[in-house]
Image (cartoon, helix red, strand yellow):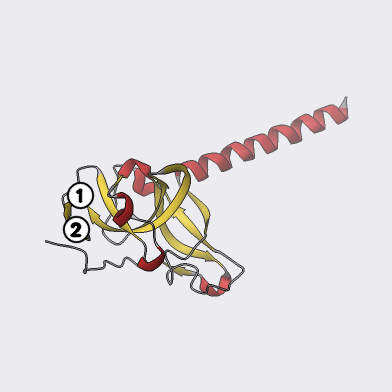
Amino acid sequence: MGTQNMILNVFKKYIGIGLVGITVTDRYGGVCPIRGSSMSPTFNPSLGSFTDDYVFLEKFCLDKYRFAHGDVVIFSDPTNYKERCVKRIVAMEGDYISNVSGVVKVPEGHCWVEGDNSASSFDSRSFGPIPLGLIHGRVTHIVWPPQRIKKIDRKVPQEGLAF
């Protein structure tokens, strides 16, 4: 009887810890890997590196969609919902952005995202503005590898904006 109670208590403890962990990562933030070169040099600056950058994804911004120009966000790919993308917000709803097809006004409830490395980035220049509802959170810090730990700054490229 004592062994069964001990196993049950351990099981309850781990279930409780697991539920708290899931709640924290779902509501407040978590750590995500960044793969690819579309955001280089901000993330994964060296092509030959065997380690990906890991970032902290803050989710408080999802409350009332509090985003700003220059925020780096992770969102579901609008062409394949199973894929996640990381890009920088270049324009918000109501802004005008110029691209190869002319000047585009970002519709309400959407934003325009672009990768820092435009040569290898599949972004709003390809699929247009994305709904804010696809965003999973804002990237605030690189947390791994240790030599790259830093805060992510907001940078707003001016070349595409048409005011």
In percent of width and height, residue 75 lies at 40, 48
CA separation in Å, label 1 and label 2: 7 Å
Q: Nearer the viewer, residue 90 or 14?
A: 90
In screen coordinates, is 20 left or right of 141?
Answer: right
Disc 1 is placed on an element classified as loop
Q: On the rendered image, what quadrant is the C terminus found in?
A: bottom left
Considering only vertical position in the picture, is 13 above or below 31?
above
Determine which of the numbered discs, if any, sits on residue 106 in the image. Answer: 1
Considering only vertical position in the picture, is 135 above or below 10?
below
Q: How crowded is the residue under tag 2: few (<14 C-alpha within 10 Å), some, or many (20+)?
A: many
Residue located at (40% from left, 44% from top): 79
Q: Nearer the viewer, residue 121 or 131?
A: 121
Q: Are marks 1 and 2 in contact (CB under 8 Å)?
A: yes
For this orientation, the residue located farthest to the left is 163
In screen coordinates, is 24 left or right of 1?
Answer: left
In percent of width and height, residue 99 lies at 22, 60
Badge 1 amino acid = Val
Q: On the rendered image, what quadrant is the N terminus found in?
A: top right
Determine which of the numbered discs, if any, sits on residue 60 in the image. Answer: none
For this orientation, the residue located farthest to the front is 101
Q: How many marks?
A: 2
Disc 2 is placed on an element classified as strand
In screen coordinates, is 7 left or right of 54?
Answer: right
Residue located at (62% from left, 39% from top): 18
Determine which of the numbered discs, if any, sits on residue 97 in the image. Answer: 2
Residue located at (43% from left, 53% from top): 85
Considering only vertical position in the picture, is 117 above or below 21?
below
In which quadrant of the rendered view does residue 103 lie? bottom left
In percent of width and height, residue 97 lies at 19, 58
In percent of width and height, residue 57 lies at 45, 54
Q: Earlier in the sequence, mark 1 or mark 2?
A: 2
Badge 2 amino acid = Ile
